[in-house]
Image (cartoon, rainbow, N blue to C red):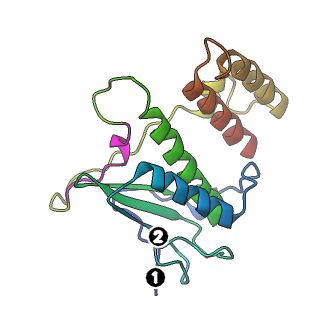
C-alpha cells in the first residue's frame, strides 16, 4: 500500500487549517494532465508523485476519482544529479493541492526562462539536501503575505480585496508595455488566497 511520502523538514498544514479552494475549476484528471505537461517541459531525469491514496498510476499520480483522507501532494524529481521536492497540503481537496504544485512548477519554469541572473537557479528553493546530510534544513520558499502584496489589511472585506487587486492587475498586466508577468501572477495568487479565507 502506498502512502504519502512527505519530505523531511517540510511543515504540514494542520487538518483544521486546510481550506477549500473554489478558484481552481479544473478536474483532477485535467490537473494531473497539466502537471505532466509541465514536467515534460521541465524535462527532469526522472520524477514521481506521492499522495495519500492507495490506488495511483505507476508514476504516483492520483487516479481521476481519488479522494484520500490526507489531501496532501508531493512531487519529487531529479535533474543534473540534484534532487528536488515540492509539496502542498494547504487545501482540503487533493485536486487543489495538485493544482497548486502544478501552477508553482509552471510559474517557476517560466521565471527560469527570463534573461535575469540570480545567485541560484529558480528551482533552488525546491532542491533537497544530499542524502547523507541528515541535519540539513530544507528551506521552503518565502512568500509575501497576500495582504502585503495587495496593500490591504489582513481582514479587509471582499470588495476592498477585489478593488485593490483589480487596480494592481491593471498596472502590471503582461499585455501592457511596462507590464510585469511575475508581479501580475503574484497579485492574482494573493487575491485568490485572501478570497478563499
Nearer to us in this view, 166 or 42? 42
Q: Are marks 1 and 2 in contact (CB under 8 Å)?
A: yes
Q: Position of residue 141 (x, y in %)?
A: 42, 41
- Say above or below: 196 vs 13: above
In the image, which disc is placed on residue 50?
2
Residue at figure coordinates x 41%, y 70% from the top left:
5
Q: Is 127 placed left or right of 166 in the picture?
A: left
Is residue 49 visible in the rendered structure shown here? yes
Q: Residue pushed farthest left?
A: 132
Q: Which residues are magenta?
A: 122-130
Residue at figure coordinates x 56%, y 78% from the top left:
53
Residue 128 colored in magenta in the image: yes
Q: Position of residue 110 (x, y in %)?
A: 49, 36
Residue matched to label 1:
2
Is residue 197 visible in the rendered structure shown here? no
Q: Is 131 placed left or right of 156 in the picture?
A: left
Residue 131 colored in magenta in the image: no
Residue at figure coordinates x 63%, y 12% from the top left:
177
The numbered mark, 1 or 2, whose residue comes first in the sequence reads 1
Local secondary structure at mark 2 = strand
- Say above or below: 155 vs 84: above
Q: Is 90 placed left or right of 28 in the picture?
A: left
Q: Position of residue 33 (x, y in %)?
A: 60, 61
Nearer to us in this view, 16 or 110? 110
Q: Quadrant of residue 173?
A: top right
Amino acid at each position: 500500500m502506498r502512502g504519502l511520502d512527505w519530505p523531511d523538514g517540510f511543515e504540514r498544514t494542520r487538518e483544521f487549517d486546510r481550506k477549500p479552494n473554489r478558484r481552481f475549476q479544473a478536474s483532477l484528471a485535467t490537473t494531473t494532465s497539466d502537471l505532466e505537461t509541465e514536467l515534460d517541459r521541465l524535462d527532469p531525469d526522472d520524477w514521481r508523485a506521492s499522495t495519500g491514496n492507495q490506488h495511483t498510476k505507476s508514476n504516483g499520480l492520483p487516479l481521476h476519482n481519488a479522494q484520500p483522507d490526507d489531501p496532501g501532494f508531493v512531487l519529487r524529481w531529479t535533474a543534473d544529479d540534484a534532487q528536488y521536492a515540492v509539496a502542498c497540503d494547504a487545501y482540503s481537496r487533493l485536486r487543489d493541492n495538485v493544482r497548486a504544485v502544478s501552477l508553482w512548477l509552471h510559474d517557476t519554469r517560466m521565471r527560469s526562462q527570463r534573461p535575469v541572473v540570480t545567485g541560484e537557479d529558480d528551482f533552488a528553493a525546491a532542491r533537497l539536501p544530499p542524502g547523507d546530510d541528515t541535519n540539513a534544513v530544507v528551506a521552503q520558499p518565502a512568500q509575501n503575505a497576500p495582504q502585503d502584496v495587495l496593500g490591504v489589511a489582513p481582514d479587509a472585506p471582499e470588495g476592498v480585496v477585489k478593488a485593490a487587486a483589480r487596480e494592481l492587475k491593471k498596472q502590471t498586466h503582461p499585455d501592457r508595455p511596462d507590464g510585469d508577468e511575475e508581479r501580475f501572477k503574484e497579485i492574482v495568487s494573493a487575491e485568490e488566497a485572501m478570497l478563499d479565507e
